[in-house]
């Protein structure tokens, strides 16, 4: 059974659905399309659910804002649509061919595939191309960034292997074993942002924390690191 209600906080309002189920606890969800849903046991009275939502309304507003921003920033995969690569926007030009392929030439993504009107196919072909370029560029920039570290650091550590993957909440990570993972989405950022994330993760080889020793090394290798960090936040 479902019911529709409205919540509000700080002058902002939102609608939410009440979904009654066979369950033991009340849960509040902001779905991928921005819909707010309260999942509740069948026996909970409506006034208690309203109070439950009102006490969490600030979180709902903030979470919906994040979800809707993500939706607005998702490009469509049709001819002429602009997509980001290394911090700049370039158009797609779609044509039909037997197999999917992307050729980046003259500041244009030339995409060929069986059904150029199928956005899912276009998305998959583009993602394969982004991943291929990311693997190539990330390794190249890893070598370049590693060489910026002091001699004692280069003598102490080896250049890490890189794993490229989609990451929802982080741009990169470094394990205690010295394995570095970088977000596929960095291929869409300016190279200086990619370099900042790589240097950041390399610093964790020496300082596996965000204490003073970490930031001393980060500032030594990349004095303008705050500028690059702010740029990532602005573009993401």
Image: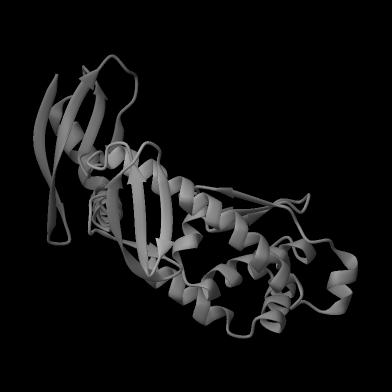
Residue in the image at 14% along x and 18% along y? 1
Find residue 154 and report its horizontal and vertical position in percent. 85, 71
Q: Is residue 65 left or right of residue 216?
A: left
Give 10 or 142, whichever is nearer the viewer. Answer: 142
Residue 228 seen by the camera: yes
Colour mode of the rendering: one colour
Q: Total label count? A: 0
Instruction: Judge whether 120 appears above or below 165 on screen.
Output: above
Find residue 53 and report its horizontal and vertical position in percent. 22, 41
Give 48 or 148, whichever is nearer the viewer. Answer: 148
> In which quadrant will I find the C terminus?
bottom left
Q: Is residue 56 left or right of residue 234?
A: left
Find residue 99 and report its horizontal and vertical position in percent. 40, 38
The quarter holding residue 136 reads bottom right
Residue in the image at 58% along x and 57% along y? 172
Give 101 or 40, whichever is nearer the viewer. Answer: 101
Which residue is most to the top?
22
Which residue is most to the bottom?
223
Residue in the image at 72% along x and 67% along y? 143
Which residue is most to the front?
97
The quarter holding residue 215 reads bottom right
Give 77 or 210, whichever is nearer the viewer. Answer: 77
Residue 169 seen by the camera: no
Find residue 21 and report its horizontal and vertical position in percent. 25, 17
């Amino acid at each position: 059974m479902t019911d529709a209600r409205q919540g509000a906080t700080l002058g902002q309002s939102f609608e939410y659905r009440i979904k009654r189920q066979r369950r033991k606890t009340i849960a509040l969800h902001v779905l991928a399309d921005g819909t707010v849903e309260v999942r509740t046991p069948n026996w909970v009275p409506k006034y208690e659910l309203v109070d439950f939502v009102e006490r969490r309304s600030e979180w709902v507003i903030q979470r919906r804002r994040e979800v809707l921003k993500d939706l607005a920033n998702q490009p469509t995969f049709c001819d002429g649509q602009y997509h980001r690569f290394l911090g700049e926007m370039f158009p797609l030009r779609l044509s039909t061919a037997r197999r999917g392929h992307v050729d980046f030439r003259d500041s244009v993504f030339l995409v060929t595939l069986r059904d150029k009107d199928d956005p899912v196919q276009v998305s998959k072909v583009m993602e394969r191309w982004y991943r291929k370029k990311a693997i190539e560029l990330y390794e190249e920039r890893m070598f370049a960034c590693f060489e910026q570290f002091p001699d004692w650091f280069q003598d102490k550590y080896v250049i890490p292997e890189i794993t490229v993957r989609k990451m929802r909440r982080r741009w990169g990570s470094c394990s205690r074993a010295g394995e570095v993972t970088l977000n596929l989405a960095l291929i869409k950022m300016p190279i200086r942002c990619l370099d900042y994330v790589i240097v950041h993760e390399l610093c964790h080889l020496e300082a596996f924390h965000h204490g003073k020793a970490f930031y001393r090394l980060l500032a030594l290798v990349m004095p303008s690191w705050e500028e690059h960090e702010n740029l990532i936040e602005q573009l993401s």
